[in-house]
Image (spheres, rainbow, N blue to C red):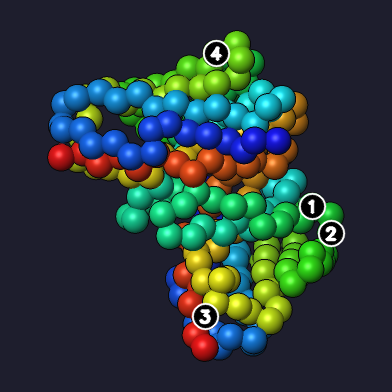
């Protein structure tokens, strides 16, 4: 069945890079997404990558996709306290998103 | 463009009652999807509507239903509420023409069932 896995927690120092990892199972996913959720809020689309790409860079965000290993990562450069949130990766399954468990990123000074 | 809006933002109900949640998609978007978020189960897909038709459905009991109007606004209804229905209910909209268009989420409706 479909399953998207993420580590639950990541703690980094302000100014360092953060790397959040995700593994997925559906090799037919056309797009893979990263969403951010701040406390009490909905999901904010951060970035996405098309399945035929290996890498996508968007300002401080870099997405790496290893299709062979079904591994997706999100790198946040120069992590700031405002980046503290839960980050969800998601794969597409026709018209719905399958979400990972979410990684809680804590940034400390 | 205005984003996805959901009303109400917060709701308290008691077991056995029913509830209706509303979602207005981004202007021009024709697809609306609903998700339930709980600490235990995470984010789970409920259903998706496109042009007033349910196009996809998740694994939820029949107490959960929805509909979409001609202006693409969508409502979700939960009948005979149970304690386990307490959750954040998120809706997302997309263009809907292809199966993989990016979904944009609203702020959610937080439902507490007592």
- Residue, disc 2: A53
Q: CA distance from mark 1 to mark 2?
A: 6 Å
Q: Residue at x 56, y 71 (%)?
A: A82
Image position, residue A89 (x, y; %): 59, 58
Tell me the chain of label 3. A
Q: Which residue is mark 4?
A: B69
**Do the CB atoms of the residues marked 1 and 2 lie less than 8 Å apart?**
yes
Res A47 visible:
yes
User: Of B94 and A6, which appears nearest the observer?
Assistant: B94
Q: Chain of mark 1?
A: A
**Which residue is most to the front?**
B2
Work out whether mark 1 precedes mark 3 in sequence or the reverse, and give the earlier one. 1
| SS class, disc 2 | loop
Q: Crowding at label 1, few (<14), some or many (≥20) Cα neighbours within 10 Å?
A: some
Q: Which residue is mark 1?
A: A50
Residue A67 in the image: state x and y as whole percent.
75, 62
**Which is closer to the viewer, label 2 or label 4?**
4
Label 3: which residue?
A: A107
| SS label for mark 1 | strand
Q: Is residue A9 above or below residue A56?
A: below
Of labels 3 and 2, earlier in sequence is: 2
Labelled pair 4, 3 in contact (Cβ < 8 Å): no
């Amino acid at each position: 069945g479909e399953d998207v896995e993420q580590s639950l927690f990541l703690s980094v120092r302000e100014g360092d890079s953060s790397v959040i990892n995700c593994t997925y199972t559906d090799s037919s996913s056309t797009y893979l997404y990263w969403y951010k959720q701040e406390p009490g809020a909905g999901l904010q689309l951060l970035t996405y990558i098309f399945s035929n790409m290996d890498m996508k860079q968007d300002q401080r965000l870099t997405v790496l996709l290893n299709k062979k290993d079904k591994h997706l990562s999100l790198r946040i450069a120069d992590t700031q306290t405002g980046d503290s949130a839960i980050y969800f990766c998601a794969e597409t399954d026709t018209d719905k998103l399958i979400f990972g468990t979410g990684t809680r990123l804590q940034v400390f000074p | 463009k205005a984003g996805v809006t959901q009303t109400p933002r917060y709701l308290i109900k008691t077991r056995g009652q029913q509830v209706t949640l509303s979602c207005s998609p981004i202007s021009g978007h024709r697809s609306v999807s609903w998700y339930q978020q709980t600490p235990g189960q995470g984010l789970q897909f409920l259903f998706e509507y496109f042009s007033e038709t349910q196009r996809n459905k998740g694994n939820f009991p029949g107490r959960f239903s929805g509909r979409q109007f001609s202006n693409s606004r969508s409502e979700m209804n939960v009948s005979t509420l149970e304690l386990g229905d307490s959750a954040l209910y998120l809706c997302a909209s997309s263009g809907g023409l292809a199966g993989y268009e990016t979904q944009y989420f609203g702020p959610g409706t937080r439902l507490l069932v007592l």
